[in-house]
Structure formats: C-alpha cells, structure tokens
Image: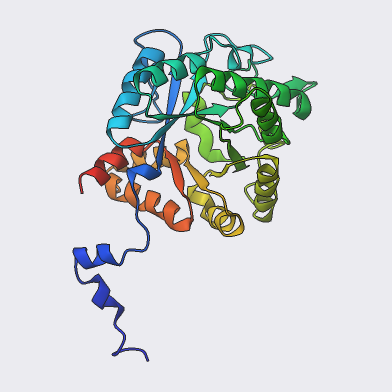
Amino acid sequence: MAYPIHRPRRLRSGDTLRRMVRETTLSPDDLIYPLFVTFGKGVRNNISSMPGCFQMSVDEIVKEAHKVYKLGIPAIILFGIPEHKDAKASQAYSPKGVVQQAIRAIKNKVPELLVITDVCLCEYTDHGHCGIIKKGKVLNDPTLELLAKEALSHVKAGADIVAPSDMMDGRVAAIRTILDSNGHDEIPIISYAAKYSSAFYGPFREAAESTPSFGDRKSYQMDPANRREAIKEVALDIDEGADIVMVKPALSYMDIISDVKESFDLPVAAYNVSGEYSMVKAAAKKGWIDETKVMMEILTSFKRAGADMILTYHAKDAAKQLNSH
C-alpha cells in the first residue's frame, strides 16, 4: 500500500533517527592522504592551484605524517619531486631518492602509519611521460623493468603498499614478480586499474611537476567515454596479482566505481583527484558553496557508490569534521 500508510518522512524526523537508518557512513578509517615530497630541508612550498597542499621536504613530511596519524587517518600515499630528472627516471628507483628517504623517515618516527607509494615515472623523467620514450612514443615493455625496480626500491625502504599508476600493460605482473622473487610476497599492490585520461588532473601536474613536455597521455590512460573497458582493465590487473583496485578520477566516474564493486570481490579505492579538490576550494573561496558540507557530501557519495577507501586531499579536513561528531 502507498500513502497514507507509508510515509518515508517518518524516518527523517530528527537527526538521531536519521543517523540510525543511514545506509552509508564515512569514517577517518576510509581515508588516504596524498603527500608530495621534495628535496631540501625545511621546505614547505605552497601549491597555488591546490590551497592547503604543499611540496614538503622529508623533515616536513615527517611532521605532516604525525599530524595525519593523530587525526585517525590510517594511511598516506607519497609522490616524489626529485632534484634531477632524466630520460630513464633514475631518481625513481634510487635508494637515495626523495620518496625512499621519506619512507624510511616516516616509518622511523610514525611506524603505525601505513605508507603507500605511487609507482610511476612521470615525476622523474625529463619529458614528463610515464615511460621510456623512443621516436616520440611511450614504450610499454621497456618501461615495466623500471617500474618494477622502483616498486622494489620503495619496499626495501619500508613501504607497506605499492600503487602503480602508469597504466602500462602488464605492470602489476612485473611488480608482483620482482617483489615475490625478492622475498616480499606479503606486500600488497593497489593498482590504479581504471585510470582515465582526465582533465581533472591539472592541479596535480603543478604539484608533482609532471606535465608532459610534448603530446598527452591518451595512448596509455583510458578514454573517459569508455565504461565496459574499465571492467576489462580491472580484471587483467586482478589476474596479474592486484590486491586492491582503484578508479581514478572519482567524482565523474562513480558509475565505474559502482560497476567495479559489483563485478569483483576485492577492495575498491577511489581517487578524489586534484581538480575535484580545487573546484571545491575555488567555489568556497567565492562564497558560492559551503565547503565543509559539499566536501562531506562528495566523500560520502564515493562510499555510497562502492568505494572502500578514498584517496583525497580533503582527508585532514574531513577527519577533523568526523572526529568532532
């Protein structure tokens, strides 16, 4: 029977009752905070297109990691900005690289905090692409060896999880093989399995200093128009040994998050990317939106779509809001 027997508003009559019947809940445990580590000491460079975010030297990253842990956020993911770049991204897999130094320092001072590392070459190459270049093309298979070396160097430094984001075919298998053959079969892989060639990455490229010097990344990142292809990409990465799969970006791709969650019995991560973050910040600065309410609504929507964990630059602000209730 319908109205007047059934009145859905009965369960919306007060805050306590609304909390009791809420289908989706958000917790600091769901959040992963991205951090940008650079060379030097005492460095805390403001990222103009991402208010509240910074490029930080290792000593500053350790301080930030401690703050993150105190807020109840369980994990961070590190991106590196090296002092020198070259065609083979040598600083990506150097034991003395900025990410490797940051891992060791964080695990020494905040050992309980989970340290995830982004495994890619774009921040370390002098051309800004995610792989080896030959005659203007990104070569897939030669890139795999360098990605595997990078992942192993992160784990040797103490990383808890590695997260390949390059979108080269076969990179999960290459990383799983090198980790297992070096006695690191317990290290999980979070695969950027469905990573789209998105305009929402703009501010990140300022933060990570990774804008390609020519062309674009459409030959390896996914076409934003494709939905079914995401399931294929995720399935391939799972077959290669991924333990967690990621959809990136998140806000315009909640259908993909939902599809992946429905199709596979693995944890799903969603990356709330830089452009999504910066739009909220810019609109809030203009007074057009309530930043906190919009932030929490967006993050909750990712959980509702099926995300088990959310990588977001809002993580600290969201955790403070959640901890206040």
Task: Please name the residue shown 57% across and 9% down the image.
Answer: 84
Q: Give the percent coordinates (x, y) of residue 256.
A: 57, 54
Extreme-right residue of the structure: 135
Q: Which image quadrant for residue 197?
A: top right
Q: Give the percent coordinates (x, y) of residue 227.
A: 64, 54
Extreme-front residue of the structure: 183
> Could you tell whether 309 is left or right of 284 in the image?
right
The residue nearer to you, when weighing 40 against 202, is 40
Residue 185 visible in image: yes
Task: Please name the residue shown 60% across and 33% down the image.
Answer: 165
Count of numbered labels shown in the rendering: 0
> Could you tell whether 181 is left or right of 260 in the image?
right
The residue nearer to you, when weighing 81 against 283, is 81
Q: Which image quadrant for residue 2?
A: bottom left
- Vertical relation: 89 (above or below) 160: above
- Vertical relation: 85 (above or below) 314: above
- Vertical relation: 34 (above or below) 226: above
Residue 130 visible in image: no
> Could you tell whether 310 is left or right of 247 in the image?
left
Q: Give the percent coordinates (x, y) of residue 97.
A: 53, 12
Q: Give the percent coordinates (x, y) of residue 9.
A: 27, 76
The residue nearer to you, when weighing 316 against 29, is 29
- The quarter of the picture where the N terminus appears is bottom left
Task: Please name the residue shown 30% across and 78% down the image.
Answer: 8
Color style of the picture: rainbow
